[in-house]
Image (cartoon, helix red, strand yellow):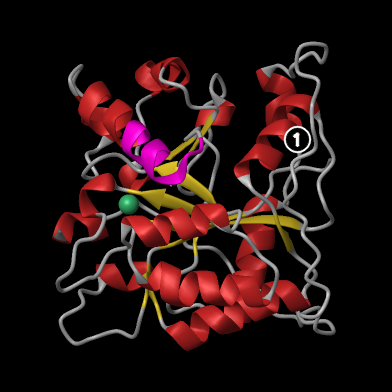
Amino acid sequence: MKSFLLYGAVSTLLLTSCQPSKASKEKEAADTTETVKIDSANTKPADNKTILARREVPVLCYHQIRNNIASDSKRAHDDIIAPDKFKEHMKMLADSGYHSILPDQLYNYLVYGAKLPEKPIIITFDDTDEDQFTIGNTTLKKYGFKGVYFIMTVSIGRKGRINYMTKEQIKQLSDEGNTIASHTYDHKNFAQFTDEDWTTQIDAPTKKLEEITGKKVEYFAFPYGVFKASTLHKLKEHGFKAAFILSTARDENYPLYTIRRIIDPGRYTAKNLYYSINKSFNKTKP
Ligand SMILES: [Zn+2]
């Protein structure tokens, strides 16, 4: 399980100082996650150049929401955020006017130019940890946010040093309007996939998650954020509309399959996160 904590290089983002907060919008909580219907048969999809030129929507990546313990390695700290800190960071997003959106909305925006709410953001969780349900989902709901849960199916229902979400919890997240997505069977590095892995790490997990949720599974996150350009086309063939990396560069031939995310590490203050979002994602004008 230790290997689940090893992620690819995440660039350290420069931080500046200024006040991010505005008045609390906690009460607003309008649902901004409804997908606009696109007449895809009669709407021309954008080419890669157009997709790459669109302003990037910030995507955040979380793993474990818990307090550190002595045995946590230094490297693991990036993947652990204290519950109080996580709550503070979600409040900062709400107070700063961010609206959570879901992958279907991002896809329609990138491919068809569909409109997004003001200050869109995507909040994602990797690896199935139960605290994403107990603390993550509970906190998101408080601010009217929805999330994306990238599940590695081997861990479903597992209890131990780390507790993982059960089928019932995953179904509830889906029923409440969050997106359930794939993160392979057991976190195998995508760059090392064999032919057989396309069945065990991709097709079987999709089937399992679709059985649990009763909905299609169309989004994928690469374990460790690592991808291999030469096999990205296969994700489309296996039913995925888009896939998420970490904060490395997008593949210019497959921008939909290399959507960038940043980790919100446990050491960040809410202000650090605010500036990190702007530094990493707001380079391109609409
Ligand atoms: Zn992972």
Left or right: 219, with 21 as reference point: left
Q: Kindly tell me whether residue 136 is visible in this rendering.
A: yes
| Residue 268 higher or lower than 128, as above or below | below
| Residue 22 higher or lower than 166, as above or below | below
Q: Secondary structure at mark 1?
A: helix
- Please state, as top left, top right, bottom left or bottom right, where the C terminus lies in the image: top right
Mark 1: give few (<14), some (14-19) or many (20+) Cα within 10 Å: some
In the image, residue 214 lies in the stretch drawn in magenta: yes
Residue occupying image coordinates x 15% and y 81%: 71
Left or right: 17, with 44 as reference point: left
Instruction: Read off the magenta span.
Output: 206-215
| Residue 17 higher or lower than 265, as above or below | below
Q: Closest to the observer: 108 or 130?
A: 130
For residue 100, which quarter of the picture?
bottom right
Q: Which residue is mark 1?
A: 109
- Please state, as top left, top right, bottom left or bottom right, where the N terminus lies in the image: bottom left
| Residue 87 higher or lower than 261, as above or below | below
Q: Kindly tell me whether residue 11 is visible in this rendering.
A: no
Which amino acid, mark 1? Tyr
Residue 270: image location, x then y, percent: 60, 80
Residue occupying image coordinates x 62% and y 60%: 146
Residue 51: image location, x then y, percent: 70, 27
In the image, residue 37 lies in the stretch drawn in magenta: no
Q: Closest to the observer: 187 or 47?
A: 187
Q: Closest to the observer: 166 or 120?
A: 166
Residue occupying image coordinates x 43% and y 75%: 134
Residue 22: image location, x then y, percent: 83, 82
For residue 42, which quarter of the picture?
top right
Give the prevailing secondary structure in the magenta stretch. Answer: helix
